């Protein structure tokens, strides 16, 4: 991960996910809010986590993973747009790390839900029989926090498509207010 800029209100960042030395996902021009530490987490716990990250890392198997939130289809215009709703649980194990004093829904889980919608929609526009994957996520802006118990409406829309890739717009709304936006590129990995 690379921090491009950081001030008291926001952090701009980018990064890559790799398997072996193969890039599998790129984040570009992403912006998220900065948090007042004492309001969200215990400073001593954050120091300990930072030392773990800079040192040996966490022990393998420490985190068993989570179940992806269910998506309920709201609206579908084939090859153009998919909208779905997702209910954020009131309590979940991931809130212990995100954040103990003031839990907020992790943007990575919102991104996972968007990936699921985007891959489904791109599959309607790209040649049949292809295995699809997200390649790049750009211009992500988290505009406000998503809280436990809230219902989130997420949307993916086709911006453009070629034979091997589709570019999509992403949005998330809570109570009719836009809380996150971004763009995603879905590409073919070859025949299924």
Image (cartoon, rainbow, N blue to C red):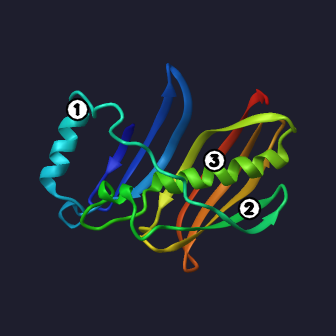
Quarter holding residue 161: top right
**What residue is pinned by disc 2?**
82
Q: Quadrant of the N terminus?
A: top left
Label 1 Cα crowd, 10 Å radius (few <14 / some 14-19 / many 20+):
few
Point out which mark residue 184 bears: 3
* Spatial separation of the CA atoms under disc 3 and disc 2: 14 Å
* Spatial separation of the CA atoms under disc 2 and disc 1: 40 Å
Q: Residue at x 28, y 34 (%)?
A: 58
Residue 183 is situated, as x and y percent measured from the top left of the image, at: 62, 51
Indicate the secondary structure of the residue bearing disc 1. Answer: helix
- 169 on left or right of 81: left
Label 2 Cα crowd, 10 Å radius (few <14 / some 14-19 / many 20+):
many
Residue 48 is situated, as x and y percent measured from the top left of the image, at: 16, 43
Kindly give the residue lying farthest to the right in the view shown. 128
Q: Nearer the viewer, mark 3 or mark 2?
A: 2
Compare marks 2 and 1 and give the one earlier in the sequence.
1
* Spatial separation of the CA atoms under disc 1 and disc 3: 30 Å
**What residue is pinned by disc 1?**
54
- 24 on left or right of 148: right
Q: Nearer the viewer, residue 64 or 28?
A: 64
Residue 168 is situated, as x and y percent measured from the top left of the image, at: 69, 51
């Amino acid at each position: 991960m690379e921090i491009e800029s950081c001030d008291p209100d926001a952090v701009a960042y980018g990064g890559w996910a790799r398997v072996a030395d193969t890039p599998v996902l790129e984040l570009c021009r992403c912006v998220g809010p900065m948090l007042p530490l004492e309001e969200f987490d215990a400073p001593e716990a954050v120091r300990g986590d930072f030392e773990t990250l800079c040192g040996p890392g966490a022990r393998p198997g420490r985190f068993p993973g989570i179940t992806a939130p269910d998506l309920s289809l709201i609206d579908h215009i084939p090859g153009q747009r998919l909208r779905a709703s997702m209910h954020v649980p009131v309590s979940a194990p991931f809130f212990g790390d995100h954040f103990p004093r003031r839990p907020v829904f992790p943007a990575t889980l919102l991104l996972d839900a968007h990936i699921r919608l985007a891959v489904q929609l791109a599959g309607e526009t790209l040649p049949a029989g292809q295995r699809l994957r997200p390649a790049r996520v750009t211009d992500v802006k988290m505009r406000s926090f998503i809280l436990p118990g809230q219902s989130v409406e997420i949307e993916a829309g086709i911006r453009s498509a070629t034979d091997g890739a589709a570019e999509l717009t992403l949005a998330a709304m809570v109570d009719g207010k836009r809380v996150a936006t971004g763009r995603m590129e879905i590409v073919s990995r070859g025949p299924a």
